[in-house]
Image (cartoon, coloured by chain):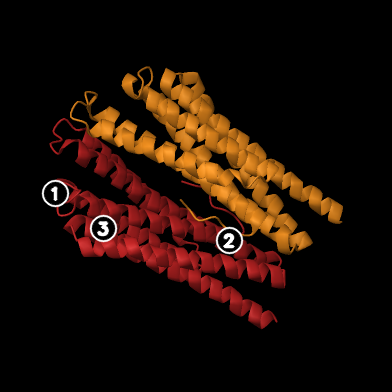
Chain colours: A red, B orange
Amino acid sequence: MRDSFHGELSKINEILVRMTDLAQLAMDSATKALLTSDLTLAEAVISGDAQIDALHRELEERSMDLLARQQPVAVDLRTIIGGLRMVSSLERMGDLARHIATIARMRYPDCAVPDELKPIFAEAAQVADKIIAKTRDVLVERDVSLASEIAKDDDRMDALHRELFARVLDDNWAHGMEAAIDVTLLGRFYERYADHAVSLARRMVQLVTGVLPASA
Amino acid sequence: MRDSFHGELSKINEILVRMTDLAQLAMDSATKALLTSDLTLAEAVISGDAQIDALHRELEERSMDLLARQQPVAVDLRTIIGGLRMVSSLERMGDLARHIATIARMRYPDCAVPDELKPIFAEAAQVADKIIAKTRDVLVERDVSLASEIAKDDDRMDALHRELFARVLDDNWAHGMEAAIDVTLLGRFYERYADHAVSLARRMVQLVTGVLPASA
């Protein structure tokens, strides 16, 4: 019975890692779709979000079933409850990538991002990718030392987010209101995506060490 | 032991209801602070958010303790897990009210919202208030019939959100970029607040009926 229990638990962990991979891929594809006005890719991100949502439901069902049948305590209990919390963040990250793809699709064949801002979004996407890759390592390797690096990456994301506001508010802004609104919302979506990845990593650190790291 | 268990469970429910009240009050005060440029009130919302966060932690600790000590099954288990999900939405709602208050404070003594848009935000706040009040009724009275009303209220919120975009994008917009960005973000905060309240109510309906209502 304990063997099957730990088999079930590792299945739940596999789903979390799989969702992390999908959330990473979704963000990567959404950014490519956004910056290269790739309609097919944008639509793939939008329809692909259903897969993340389905894994969310599967994880919830398996967790409830495991809690009811096996009545775990101590670290096993905390692992299952922690998974239920983390899965909400992953689902939101999928949603945020989908929002970015939706803006890309809405402006097609134009690009929602003015050329001079593309490097900022490209970097925001790189930072998001770094954060989620490290979060995945925390999940898989239980390497809690990465948490402080992730917090630093997130500071960089916040700086990029502020930079976007500064550009839109600059007197030289020449791209009109629609682009300003798109850039404002897009900037927020990248920042929120990173926030969720950070909170995911913090939850995992809490599982491993028993202590929730202070938020940045 | 079962008596003390159900006492603990109703204590957890009390915390959820108390957090709902605080999230409602926070949004109400944030809107007043925003529309009347009331700095004191804005700061009260910002500092008051810590209370919602503290209740969040208390609910999580009590839930984990109850799960570990009593190993509940069936409806009791689902109630505790449901509470853990709902509390995340309530915490986010507190954050969103705080974001609104932060914009109000940032623009003080000016008002972030141009006069002609104040009625739209006032209505958005009313709709948010209606949704959270009904969500509270679902929580307290387990009146699942309210779910469809809540979905309709949320449709109204989405319409107000679209109306804000239309106003900002209108050629006659005369309030500059900063106000446009504020209005864009504020509109999103109200809409997200309502979304979280809707998801809270859906989770409660799921607890009562065993079925998660389809999202709108």
- Across and down, in percent, residue A36 comes to 17, 58
Tag 1 and tag 2 share a subunit: yes
Residue where numbered disc 3 is placed = A31
Chain letter of the residue beneath label 3 in the structure image: A
Drawn side of residue B99 relative to residue A65, left or right: left
**Measuring 29% from the left and 65% from the top, which residue is drawn there?**
A44
- Across and down, in percent, residue B3 comes to 86, 52
Instruction: Give the secondary structure at mark 2.
Output: helix
Q: Nearer the viewer, residue B166 or A169?
A: B166
Marks 1/2 in contact by CB < 8 Å: the verdict is no
State whether residue B197 appears in this view. no
Chain letter of the residue beneath label 2 in the structure image: A
State whether residue B120 appears in this view. yes
Q: Which amino acid type is shown beneath numbered disc 3?
A: Thr
What's the distance in space between the residues labelled 1 and 2, CA to CA? 41 Å
Q: Which amino acid type is shown beneath numbered disc 1?
A: Asp
Assign the N terminus of chain B to one quadrant of the image.
bottom right
Structural crowding at the residue carrying mark 1, measured as other residues with C-alpha within 10 Å and reported as few (<14), some (14–19) or many (≥20) = few
In the image, residue B80 sits, relative to residue A161, either above or below, namely below
Residue A115: numbered disc: 1
Q: Which amino acid type is shown beneath numbered disc 2?
A: Gly
